[in-house]
Image (tube, rainbow, N blue to C red):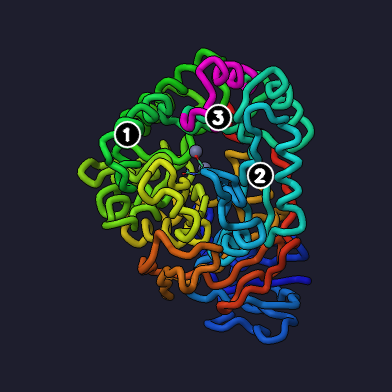
Amino acid sequence: MRTLITGGTLVGPLGAAPTDVLVDGETVAALLAPPAALGASARGAAGGGPAASGAGRPAVDADRVIDATGKYVIPGGVDVHTHMELPFGGTAASDTFATGSAAAAWGGTTTIVDFAVQRTGEVVEEGLAAWHAKAEGQCAIDYGFHMIMGGVDEAALKAMDSLVAHEGVTSFKLFMAYPGVFFSDDGQILRAMQRAADSGATIMMHAENGLAIDVLVAQALARGDTDPIHHGLTRPSALEGEATHRASVLAQVAGNPPLYFVHLSASEALGVVSAARAAGRNVFAETCPQYLYLSLEEHLGAPGFEGAKYVASPPLRTNTAPHADDLWRGLRTDDLAVVSTDHCPFCLKEQKELGRGDFSKIPNGIGTVEHRIDLIYQGVVTGKISLQRWVETCATTPARMFGLYPRKGVIAPGSDADIVVYDPNATTTISAATHHMNLDHSAWEGFEIAGKVDTVLSRGSVVVSGGQFSGRAGHGRYVPRGLSQYLR
Ligand code: URP
Ligand code: ZN
Ligand code: ZN
């Protein structure tokens, strides 16, 4: 099947230009200068055939023509931080790989990298096998895995090498937070970093000082401060900054493995990353839409139990300090290289409700996998980032950061035909009533988006078009990954 996407403006890291895209089967076959004579509507749009003859270009035979006139044509989004079905906080994230990957496709994301889990005492390889079993045959889009290391011991350290060499898992998340759940102490972190420095694997760090936070949480509960806002007040930004600095120093001592800070939320942490990068270190970071748009006061501090919807770690930050402005600046300057979602949805009913009367029992996480491309496009609309940075932070850089490029993250001959046609003239209103995530509320309820995902192709198959989903569970394949392509 040959598909011609015609009339659109192709946006990639090198810029934006009117370009037609020819897809043959599952991959991009060619980028073509648009025929001057093609006009506003693509010829052959209804039934295929010789679709695009015109001045300066021979006719192109295509079975299907997608008219992208007036729209952007961008690489499918790559969301490198999701938690489908994650067991956490006495329950499990409400999106399965089937529902979550379909929702991602609706929102223009065509690859997710989810986190397989090893807990203390568990065998790393068994954790990875369990995640393969959850995802296989379920995904509407392609997927890969990072590995959460919840118990760094001799066997786990060995397993890191084997996962890099044989399983296409080249990144390992460690936690300085969540004592008793995923927490690693500094010695464990150092050892995992040393191993990564040898193999080239990336260490992904959840940087919050979990031991100090636990003290603050116990003190708050003892005072009777049980509402959701205390989740944020007991996890101050200084403790993210401190942990970020400690991790950065440990990585330096360990021989400088690529160190990637996940869900960075605070100015203090960004300052540490900026300094390390200015010193030429292999230090990288992502942020997430919730830290760019939502705040401690307005959202986590909403009346009653409403704030539970916004409980995630790190927490939403105060709007009385310039955290969000600093994060947008970081996205502009590349000190923040990636926007991911940290998609970890829990319904209010029977899940978030577990923490009524005790904020520390509210399962941590927000569901956003469907909205990342739209939400970050608003940064283009408001002039905070350029079109290219939108594409870089949401597709190209995450693909390069995690060894998926140029198969993913770019529209170029030979790349997988993961393509989004994005309509900047249409609008989207986000609501739990219309979203596709398996979630009974939306942290983004009522958000008005200037722009809309129009058509989505995953490896050449149309999975979303004209407001209809035509994807299927099982179309998505596991994608083994290489090492980070930002190694110095
Ligand atoms: O609140 C969050 N972020 N939940 C998911 C687990 C994690 O730390 O990424
Ligand atoms: Zn985390
Ligand atoms: Zn996460």
- 243 to the left or right of 128: left
Q: Position of residue 164 (x, y in %)?
A: 72, 31
Q: Nearer the viewer, mark 3 or mark 2?
A: 3
Question: Mark 1, residues whose alpha carbon is within 10 Å: few (<14), some, or many (≥20)?
Answer: many
Q: Which residues are magenta?
A: 177-196
Pick the front one: 243 or 330? 243
Q: Secondary structure at mark 1?
A: helix
Residue with the mark numbered 3 = 174
67 lies above or below 402: below
Distance in Å between CA atoms under marks 3 and 1:
19 Å
Check residue 237 in the rendering and tell me which mark sits there, or answer none. Answer: 1
Q: To which quarter of the image does residue 46 belong?
A: bottom right
Check residue 59 in the rendering and tell me which mark sits there, or answer none. Answer: none
Amino acid residing under circle 1: Ser
The answer to whether the beta carbon of the residue marked 2 is less than 8 Å from any atom of ligand 3 is no
Q: Is residue 181 one of those drawn in magenta?
A: yes
Amino acid residing under circle 3: Leu
Residue with the mark numbered 2 = 404
Q: Secondary structure at mark 3?
A: strand
Q: Position of residue 198 (x, y in %)?
A: 66, 19
Report the quarter where the N terminus lies.
bottom right
The answer to whether the beta carbon of the residue marked 1 is less than 8 Å from any atom of ligand 1 is no
Report the quarter where the C terminus lies.
top right
